[in-house]
């Protein structure tokens, strides 16, 4: 039987490290346009307590999302063991296209995947390059699409990339802006024949748009005197999003695990999109409570949010790459390990897949 396995990965972590202290001189406003009365020390302290984010990375002025996507892809190709011209698909997940440091307008024509293919120097017209916009779960959803291509016999090698430069689309006067960061991660899925299940075994996706389509949206700065009043920025309804995630992500993970045929005791790692550290902890606790388990296995959920921030679609492929390359202490993935990947984001979308290494 044909299965999809990750044979190579790569990531790009930007050079600029932005610490929480770098926001001490920022003027923060609330959604009504009023300046927040708390001191910035109080705002930042509360932010750290809730999000667990102490620092994040931003790209340098010379780079855009397609550039860092190509850098992550190039790293993945180094250990791929085949000619890049053999790729059947390049799928790039993002949400805002290429945004230059001096122009906040989104640029997605041509598609970022086409730009990445060009940067990689791939000439083969049979290497199909396209983008996917699916909120933070975009990379995971692209992996699901790649799995369909492989299992249908349409493809043997697929590159899936998540790349975002959120530092160029957040409101500098919105305290939620401290969540966001930049980065890129890439994985290569290949077809393998196996008599026993391996690779991507099951997946689950849901889209709750009727009630929850406006949990994340674009709007003007909270600062009514912002210098460019026509600019729009990413905004979110944090409290409702938090509750939505806690109510729905654990159940989606459970349904996905049941489809795979494995049990909760088989899980070695849970790799989850990291938008908020405490939210992820609560999601994990609720997931295990669905099985009446109070004590969660130690180190089962590796975290990078404290020093990389929320990189949207780049979170999961970057996290996976750092683990398999031994760059996260006390974390590794061994052959035969069962891994649950999960994400939640704008849509609202939730998705998950179960993977056997």
Image (cartoon, rainbow, N blue to C red):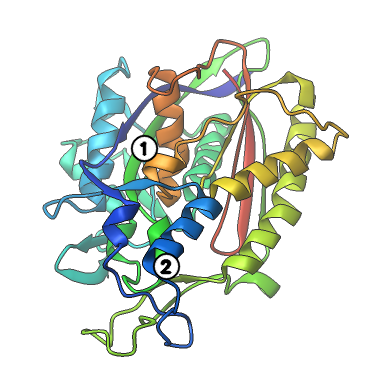
Quadrant position of residue 215:
bottom right
Side of 137 where 308 appears, left or right = left
Residue at 47% across, 52% down: 48
Side of 218 where 351 appears, left or right = right
Residue at 17% across, 70% down: 103
- How many numbered markers are drawn? 2
Judging depth in this view, the residue of 227 and 185 nearest the camera is: 227
Quadrant position of residue 234:
bottom left
Q: Position of residue 31 (x, y in %)?
A: 48, 82
Judging depth in this view, the residue of 288 and 77 nearest the camera is: 288
Q: Secondary structure at mark 1?
A: strand
* Residue 175 - label: 2
Q: Position of residue 296 (x, y in %)?
A: 73, 28
Q: Of callouts 2 and 1, which one flags the residue occurring earlier in the amino acid sequence?
A: 2
Q: Residues within 10 Å of mark 2 (few under 14, many from 20)?
A: many
Residue hosting label 1:
185
Q: Mark 2 and mark 1: span between their CA atoms?
A: 26 Å
Q: Residues within 10 Å of mark 1 (few under 14, many from 20)?
A: many
Q: Position of residue 105 (x, y in %)?
A: 24, 72
Q: Quadrant of the N terminus?
A: top right
| Residue furthest left in the image | 62
Q: Quadrant of the C terminus?
A: top right
Residue at 60% across, 24% down: 299
Residue at 28% across, 35% down: 72
């Amino acid at each position: 039987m044909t299965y999809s396995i990750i044979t190579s990965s790569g990531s790009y972590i930007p050079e600029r490290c932005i610490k929480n202290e770098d926001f001490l001189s920022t003027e923060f406003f609330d959604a009504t346009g009023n300046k927040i009365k708390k001191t910035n020390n109080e705002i930042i302290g509360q932010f750290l307590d809730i999000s667990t984010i102490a620092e994040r990375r931003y790209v340098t002025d010379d780079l855009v999302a397609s550039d860092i996507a190509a850098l992550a892809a190039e790293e993945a190709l180094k250990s791929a063991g085949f000619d890049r011209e053999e790729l059947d698909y390049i799928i790039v997940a993002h949400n805002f296209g290429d945004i230059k440091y001096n122009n906040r307008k989104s640029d997605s024509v041509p598609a970022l995947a086409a730009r990445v293919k060009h940067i990689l120097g791939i000439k083969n017209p049979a290497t199909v390059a396209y983008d996917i916009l699916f909120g933070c779960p975009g990379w995971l959803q692209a992996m699901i699409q790649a799995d369909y291509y492989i299992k249908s016999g349409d493809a043997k090698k697929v590159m899936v990339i998540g790349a975002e430069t959120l530092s160029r689309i957040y409101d500098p006067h919105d305290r939620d802006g401290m969540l966001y960061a930049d980065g890129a991660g890439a994985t290569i899925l290949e077809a393998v024949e196996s008599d026993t299940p391996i690779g991507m075994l099951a997946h689950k996706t849901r889209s709750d748009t009727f009630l929850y389509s406006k949990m994340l949206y674009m709007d003007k700065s909270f600062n009514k005197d912002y210098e460019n009043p026509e600019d729009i920025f990413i905004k979110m309804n944090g409290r409702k999003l938090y509750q939505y995630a806690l109510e729905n992500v654990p159940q989606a993970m459970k349904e996905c695990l049941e489809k795979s045929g494995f049990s909760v005791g088989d899980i070695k790692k849970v790799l989850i999109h990291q938008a908020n550290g405490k939210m992820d902890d609560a999601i994990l606790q609720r997931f295990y409570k669905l099985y009446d388990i109070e004590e969660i296995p130690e180190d089962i959920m590796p975290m990078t949010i404290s020093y990389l921030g929320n990189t949207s679609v780049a979170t999961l492929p970057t996290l996976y790459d750092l683990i398999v390359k031994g760059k996260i202490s006390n974390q590794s993935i061994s052959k035969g390990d069962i891994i649950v990947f999960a994400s939640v984001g704008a849509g609202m979308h939730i998705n998950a897949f179960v993977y056997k290494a």
